[in-house]
Amino acid sequence: MDIANKLIEFALDEKDIPASASHILNLSLLDWVSVSLSGVNEPVSRIVRECFLEEGGNPEAFVLGSNKKAPSRVAALVNGTISHALDYDDTHFASLGHPSVAVMPAALAISDRVDSDLETFKRASLIGMEVATRVGVWLGRGHYRKGFHVTATAGTFGATVTAGLLLGLNERQFKMALGLAASRAAGIKAQFGTMGKPFHAGTAASNGVEASLLASRGFVSAEDGFGGPQGFGLTHDSEDNTRIFETLGSEYIFEGVSHKFHACCHGLHAGMEALIELRDKNFVKPKDVEEIEITVHPQYLNVCNILSPETGLETKFSYRFTAAMVMHGVDTARLESFSDISCRDFALTEICNKVLVRTDPELSETSARVNLRVKSGDSLTNEYDLADLTNPAKREAKVLTKSNSLLGKNRTKEIWSFITRKQPNSIPVSKALFDYS
Amino acid sequence: MDIANKLIEFALDEKDIPASASHILNLSLLDWVSVSLSGVNEPVSRIVRECFLEEGGNPEAFVLGSNKKAPSRVAALVNGTISHALDYDDTHFASLGHPSVAVMPAALAISDRVDSDLETFKRASLIGMEVATRVGVWLGRGHYRKGFHVTATAGTFGATVTAGLLLGLNERQFKMALGLAASRAAGIKAQFGTMGKPFHAGTAASNGVEASLLASRGFVSAEDGFGGPQGFGLTHDSEDNTRIFETLGSEYIFEGVSHKFHACCHGLHAGMEALIELRDKNFVKPKDVEEIEITVHPQYLNVCNILSPETGLETKFSYRFTAAMVMHGVDTARLESFSDISCRDFALTEICNKVLVRTDPELSETSARVNLRVKSGDSLTNEYDLADLTNPAKREAKVLTKSNSLLGKNRTKEIWSFITRKQPNSIPVSKALFDYS
C-alpha cells in the first residue's frame, strides 16, 4: 500500500462527513479555543510569541494573546505552542498524541490567509485530525517508546493535510507536501516537562503550513518520503501498522479522542470521575466521609501519587488531594483551583488524609475503581473508564462545562453558537473564535 | 561524558585558533560564497526564496539572489538551501556531511542581525563547523545508514553553536539551545535527488538560529536533549562514538574537509585529478591518447559510470566523458561545461571511446588509479587520493581556481582579500562577501 496515496485520496475525496465525527470535531474545536485562550500568558507562550512576532512580516493570520497578525508559518508556530502550554487539550490514546494542538493552529493560519469560511475550516481540520491519529497508530507504540513525541511527528502530517486542503493543493502537490513534511516531522520525549513539549505542537503546525506552501509553488520532494525506503517510517521506528489505513474514509477513529475535564494529570481523571458520580448519586457530603479507596493501574503510582502535596503543581499529581477537591465540590476544571494556598486548606487536607490509593494490574490504563465508605457504615463502589465515550450528549455537556469554567458562560455560548451554526456566514473564523478584531 | 557540556565548554573557551584551522576556514568561506552565488537561480533557490520572502518581516539579514534582507530565521533557511542547491559545496567524509552549507548561513544571518565583524563571524563559524563534523562522527555510519541526512541533523547542532556564539549566549542558554535543537534536527535521505536535499541545509541553519534566539529569551528545554535518555542520539540511532569528543579543542578535525573542484559527481574526482597530473606532467595532448584505464572502488560503478552520456546531467556521472574533458583541458570547475551540446562534440566523444573503467576493491573510496597509454607506446600511471590534504598551498590554489571559474578573477580577488585581511574593518560581512548594498 502506498500510504501517501491513500492519505491523499482520502483528503481529496468529496465525501460526506458523518454527523458523529462532525459533532466531536465541534467539541474539539471549542475545547481547543478554551485551552488556547487560557494559556496565552504562560511563560512559554510569552517567550515564543515575543520571539517570533519580533520578526514582523505580513499580517496573514491571527496570533493568540496579541492584537496582531503574522505570517501563517509564524502564527501556526506560536498558536500551536500556546494551545499546548497548559497540557489541557485533547488526547487520542490509541495514537498517543494530541491532535488538536497540531492541526487546529495550521487550519487557523491558512484559513485566515485565504479567508476560508467556517465549514471549509472545520472539514479541513477534521480530515487532518483523522490523518494525525491514523498516522500515530501506524507509527505505533514502538515509535513512542523509542522516544518520539507523536504530537510532533504524526501531528506534522495531519497539519500538512489540513493546510494543503485549505490551500487547495492538487494531488501532485499533496504528494510533494507530504514528502517534504517527512523531513520536518521531529520532536523527542526528552522535552517532556519542559517548554519543548508545547513547542512541538507549534512546530508540527508550522511544519504543515511550510510544507504545503512550498508544495503549492512547485517544490519537488521525495515521492515516497513518508513510507518508502529511507523515508519517515523506516527511519523513525514505525511499527508499520498499515492495516489502520484500510478503514480510512469509512470510519473516523478521531472520534475516540478524549477531552480533559480537570486541570491536572490525566492519570487522576478516571478516579475523579468515579468519585464525582458516587458523590452526586448518593448526595455524599464531606462530613459523611469515613474513608475513600482509589484503585488504579500500577503504572500511575510513580506518576501522580503525591500523598501530601505542598504546592499547586503538586496537587495536580495527587490522587488523595484531588479526591478531597472532588468531595468539596471544588471546580477542578479551573486552573486557579490548583493553588499553593489550597494545600493548607484544613477542610481539604482533612479529607486528603482519609484517602488510600491501591493498585490492580487487571484494571485498564484508562480505568479506576473507587470505594467510598461513609460514616453510617455503608460502602459505595463505582468504576469509571475514560475510554467509554459512548454518550455524545454527556461529552458535549462536559466540554461545555469545562469551557464555562475557563472562559465564562457568555463567551462559551457565543463561541459554541458560532461553531454549531448551520447557515453560512462571512465572519472570519479567527474573529468569531477569538474575538479578534 | 555529558556531550552538551563538552560542546559548550569548547564553544565558550577563549582559546587561540590554530593557523591551519583558520586557513581551511578561509578556504571554506570563499568556496561557500562561490557556490552560493552560482546557485541563486536554481529552481529550488527560486521557490524557497520567493515563498519565504513573501512573508515580509524585518530586514535583519541578507538573502542570496535578492536585494532584500529578511528576518534571520528566514535568511538562514533560504541561504542554506541556495548554497547547497548545486551540491558543489564542501564535504567532510569522516562525518558524512556538508558542514559549510548548514553553518555559514546561520553565521551570516546572526552576524547581519547583530552587526558582527569578520573576525567574530569567522571564529563562530569555525567553532560551529568543528561541532557539526564532530557530531556527525559521533552519530556515525549507523545513523547515516538508517537514513538520516547528517548535513541536516549534525548540521543543526553546528548551526546552533555558531548562532549562539554570535548572539552571546551564556552557558545555561547554550544548554537550552542545544536541548531545543535536539527536537528540530531532522532530515531523511529519501530526499536525495530532490529539492528536499538542499532544503535540509536551510533547515539546519534556520533551526540553529531559531533555537539560539529562543534560548536567548529564556526558553527552557531538555537539559540532556542531546545525549540523554529519549534524547537525540538514542532516538536517532547514534553509534555514540563518544571518543571523538575527547580531542575537542586540542585539534580541529574540520580541517579534513574536502572541497569539490569539479562540477560533477564526487565519485569521479580522484580519477580526474590523477589524469590531470599525468596530462600536465607529461604534456600529453588529446591526439597522443591510445587508451585510458581508470580503476576505482567498486561502489562507484552504479553511481557514476554512464558510458556514453547524452545530456549535460549525464556527463556529470561519467568516468569516460569527464576523462575526455580533462584531456581536452575543459574547465570542469565551471557549471556550463557540463552541457547537452558537449555530448555531441566529436573531439570529446573520440577520447571518451578510448576510456576503460575497472574496479579494485583494495582501493580506498577516495582513491583512483589511472593508466594512460600513449600512441608512442609508453604507459603512464598515477594514483590520486582525495583524502590526501597534506599540502595547504595546493588546496588554496585549487579553491581560488574554482572561485575564478565560478565568479571571475576580479570578484574572487576582492572576496579573498576581504576574507584574509588581518586588520579590523567595519564593512558588514554580507556586504563584503556578496556585494550587497
Image (spheres, coloured by chain):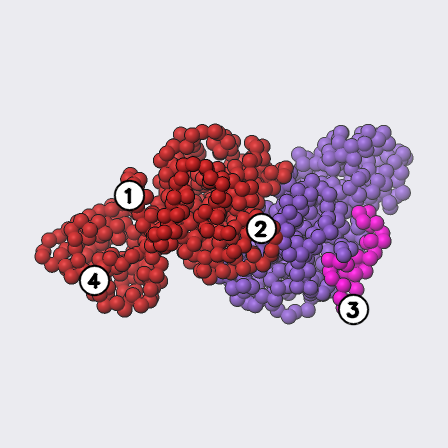
Chain colours: A purple, B red
Residue A414 position within the rendered picture, expressed as x and y whole percent measured from the top left: 82, 57
Q: Is residue B208 magenta?
A: no
Question: Where does the magenta region start and end?
Answer: A404-432
Amino acid on which disc 3 is placed: Gln
Q: Quadrant of residue B377?
A: bottom left
Q: Quadrant of residue B127?
A: top left
Which of the two residues, A300 or B368, is positioned nearer the viewer here? B368
Q: Nearer the viewer, mark 1 or mark 2?
A: 2
Q: Secondary structure at mark 4?
A: helix
Q: Main secondary structure of the magenta part?
A: helix
Neighbour tally class for label 4: few under 14, some 14-19, many 20 plus, Cα within 10 Å: many
Label at residue B351: 4
Q: Secondary structure at mark 3?
A: loop
Which residue lies under the disc numbered 1?
Answer: B394
Q: Secondary structure at mark 2?
A: loop
Which residue lies under the disc numbered 3?
Answer: A423
- Between the residue at mark 1 and the residue at mark 2, the CA separation in whole angstroms equals 40 Å
Label at residue B59: 2
Amino acid on which disc 2 is placed: Pro
